[in-house]
Every structure is written in C-alpha cells, then in structure tokens.
Amino acid sequence: MEKRALRADSERTAQAILEAAERVLSDNPAATMEQIAEAAGVSRTTVHRRFASREALVDAMTLWATQQFHDALASVRPDVTPPLVALYQVTAKVLGVKLRWGFAMNAHPQEDGVLTPDVVAQCDVFFQRLEESGTLRPGVDLVWARRVYCALIHEAAQDQDSADPDVLATRVVDTVLGGFGKPGVTVG
C-alpha cells in the first residue's frame, strides 16, 4: 500500500512539474529549470531528478501533450458518433488540449504538428467517413481537407482573444464545411 502511495505522489509531482513548465515556458521560453521548479512548488533538484535536462523536460511535456491529444480524440469515439457531431466534438476537444498545452505541442514541429502517423491515419479514416456520410462533398481531396483542418485548428489555437474551445471549434467547423462541405450542411 505504501509503495502505491509513493508512486501516486511521484506521478502527481511529475504532473505538477509538467503543468508548471507549460505555464512558465509559454510566458517565457527562456525560463530556467529553477523558475519552473518554483512554479511547480518543488525544489530544483526534484525537477532534475525527474528530468535530467531541459530537453528531457520539454520532450516529456510533448509526450504528455500528445497523449492528451490522443485521449481527446478517443473520447469522442468518432467511429460511432454521428459524423457532424464528431467533427465538432473532436475539434473542440483538440482545441482545448492545444490551448492548455500550446508550448509543448509546438516544441517539436513536424509536418502535421504533434500528429503521429497513427493519428493521421485515424483522421484520414474519419474524413473518409465525413465524405461517405454526405457531410463533405463527393470527390473532395480528403488529404488536403485534413491538412487544411489541422492548419485551421493550429491557427485557431493562436487566437488569444477567444480562448473558448467551443467558440473556436464552431469557427473551424464552419470554415471546413464552407470550403469542403456539401451545400446545406451546417453546424447549427
């Protein structure tokens, strides 16, 4: 029992460090490990014990953010949720993650942001489902539609004036439907 309590405490400490690092590094990308430790309410040695270097900390942040991204997608169950509802829900949840973990999600830019090949494949299947359901026009270039969608999500997450994931999701989905949707398909 005591070992389990120590492990849970260690996991809470690691999460506190990751969350503090996201806040601190978002405000000041040059922040020190000491500043991150202070924000997390732990000693600098505790941070270094968990993360040997700044690079290791940023890598862990990116891994954590990527997992949150995957969990957000999976929670919607886009394979069984009605396609238009799933499009909106996925968009809102992903924007929520990007707004909370913006530094980590942009720390290691890739062609598709933090999208792993698995997530890209899931997105491609989902966009195929959107086309098959009549949400998207027949013949739409689905890879292009997915890439534009991801770019819109990225840009929406940069909008500091409207940090409400639901408002931003509506904008993104309206834009996607306006460009790729079948006439008459709307969010509302």
Image (cartoon, rainbow, N blue to C red):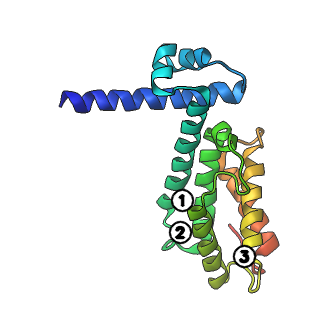
The span from disc 1 to disc 2 (Cα, nearest Å) is 8 Å
Give the residue pinned by disc 1: 73
The amino acid beneath tag 3 is Leu
Residue located 68% across and 56% down the image: 169
- Judged from the image, the secondary structure of the residue bearing numbered disc 1 is helix
For marks 1 and 2, the one nearer the N-term is 1
**Is 184 left, or right, of 164 in this rendering?**
right
Q: Residues within 10 Å of mark 3 (few under 14, many from 20)?
A: many
Left or right: 60 in relation to 173: left
**Horizontal and vertical percent for residue 52?**
52, 26
Return the disc, 3 or 2, that comes first in the chain's sequence: 2
Which residue is under mark 2?
Answer: 78
Q: Three-letter amino acid code at disc 1?
A: Leu
Distance from Cα at disc 1 to Cα at disc 3: 18 Å
| The C terminus: image quadrant | bottom right
At 64% from the left edge and 45% from the top edge, which residue is drawn? 98
Tag nearer the camera, 3 or 2: 3
Q: Mark 1–mark 3 contact, CB under 8 Å?
A: no
* Extreme residue in the left direction: 1
Q: Which residue is mark 3?
A: 142
Residue 102: image location, x then y, percent = 67, 40
| Pointer 1 with pointer 2, Cβ within 8 A | yes
Q: Position of residue 142 (x, y in %)?
A: 72, 76
Query: Residue 186, relative to residue 57: is it above or below?
Result: below
